Image (tube, helix red, strand yellow):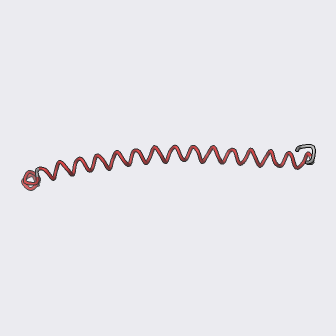
Amino acid sequence: MSEDLSPYRVAALRRWLRAANSRLLLVQHQRKLLIANAAAVKQQVEQLQRERAKRGRFPSRMAKSG
């Protein structure tokens, strides 16, 4: 294939591939960060649900304490 292309075109395609690869790596990194953040949010929501469930079991205590 490179025999059909000029050296200028080959160099341009290599630069384009390098840039595309860099963007792909960045997107993959951002995806990992989003997954980690989603897991943290899930844990926080579960913790809040557990706390609310505890308060629901003893409503009179909460009323007395304030």
Quarter the C terminus occupies: bottom left
Report the residue at 30% width, 47% height from top: 46
Q: Residue furthest front?
A: 1
Identify the image quadrant of residue 59: bottom left
Residue 56 % position (x, y): 15, 53
Horizontal side, residue 28 vs residue 15: left or right: left
**What percent of the width, then of the height, locates residue 34?**
49, 48
Image position of 54 (left or right of 22): left
Q: Quadrant of residue 14?
A: top right
Left/right placement of residue 48 relative to residue 64 reads right
The spot of residue 13 in percent (x, y) is 81, 48
Quadrant showing the N terminus: top right
Which residue is rendered at x = 37% and y = 48% of the image? 42
| Foreground pick, 62 / 36 | 36
Counting from the top left corner in percent of width and height, residue 58 is at 11, 50
11 with respect to 42 (left or right): right
Count every numbered label the image shows and give the total.
0
